[in-house]
Image (tube, coloured by chain):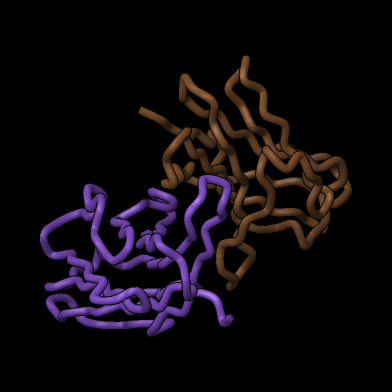
Chain colours: A brown, B purple
């Protein structure tokens, strides 16, 4: 069965510090991975997906099949990055994502 | 398009009362999902529909929970009777066909059961 693990429920950093939100998955095939973000009092929205290999709001995430990870990184955190972040996995042929439990990122001034 | 619409945005009720949450998906989307979000469990998938048909309801916690999708533009999630542990934010989401399509979430309904 597929599973997504976000080991940190809460991550607290200071503005300007690097940030890495961890995501590990379990799936033997070729996964599709996503990061969703939920800012305070807003709806969840897609932040980025691994197939796009894009940088959104300074965030990047690289799929590491060897380590089965898809960690979200940003070199210099900003206060407006404070939000709840969810990693999600979709497997071949399935349109149903499996979400991790989420990591709450707090960026202090 | 206004996106996924949910109502009410906030609901406060007393234990034992029936609660009905409503969702209007994005027009043309084939899939509709109901999620529950809590601090303890994060985001849990309760049930999803494909073309108005319930496909997987294994996430529905108890028989007190039921969901319907009478047509492509409307779905309800009902809790009867409600209990304090049902307090959470309930999200509806929809998406179109295609594995690369993202899910679009509604604003959520914050339910408080006293």
Q: Toward the viewer: B97 or A53?
A: B97
Q: Position of residue B65 (x, y in %)?
A: 18, 64
Q: Is residue A31 left or right of residue B42?
A: right
For image coordinates 41% across by 46% down, the residue present is A96
For image coordinates 46% across by 24% down, the residue present is A27
Task: Tell me the quarter of the image containing the N terminus of chain B.
Answer: bottom right
Q: Position of residue B51 (x, y in %)?
A: 32, 63
The quadrant in which residue A17 appears is top right
Image: A78 above or below A92 = below
Identify the residue at the far top of this view. A66
The quadrant in which residue B32 appears is bottom left
Image: B73 above or below B92 = below
Task: Tell me the quarter of the image containing the C terminus of chain B.
Answer: bottom left
For image coordinates 67% across by 29% down, the residue present is A63
Q: Position of residue B56 (x, y in %)?
A: 25, 50
Q: Position of residue A15 (x, y in %)?
A: 84, 52
Q: Say how many tags the image has.
A: 0
For image coordinates 22% across by 47% down, the residue present is B58
């Amino acid at each position: 069965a597929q599973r997504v693990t976000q080991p940190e429920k809460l991550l607290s950093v200071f503005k300007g510090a690097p940030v890495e939100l961890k995501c590990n998955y379990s799936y033997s095939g070729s996964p599709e991975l996503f990061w969703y973000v939920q800012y305070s009092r807003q709806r969840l929205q897609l932040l980025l997906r691994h197939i796009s290999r894009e940088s959104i709001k300074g965030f990047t995430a690289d799929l590491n099949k060897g380590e089965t990870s898809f960690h979200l990184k940003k070199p210099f955190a900003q206060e407006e990055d404070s939000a709840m972040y969810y990693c999600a996995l979709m497997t071949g042929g399935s349109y149903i994502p499996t979400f991790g439990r989420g990591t709450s990122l707090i960026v202090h001034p | 398009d206004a996106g996924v619409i949910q109502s009410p945005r906030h609901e406060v009720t007393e234990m034992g009362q029936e609660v009905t949450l409503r969702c209007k998906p994005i027009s043309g989307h084939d899939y509709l999902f109901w999620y529950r979000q809590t601090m303890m469990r994060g985001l849990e998938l309760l049930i999803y529909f494909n073309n108005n048909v319930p496909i997987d309801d294994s996430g529905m916690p108890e028989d007190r929970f039921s969901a319907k999708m009478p047509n492509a533009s409307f779905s309800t999630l009902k809790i009867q009777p409600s209990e304090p542990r049902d307090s959470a934010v309930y999200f509806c989401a929809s998406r179109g066909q295609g594995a690369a399509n993202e899910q679009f979430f509604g604003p959520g309904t914050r339910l408080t059961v006293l």
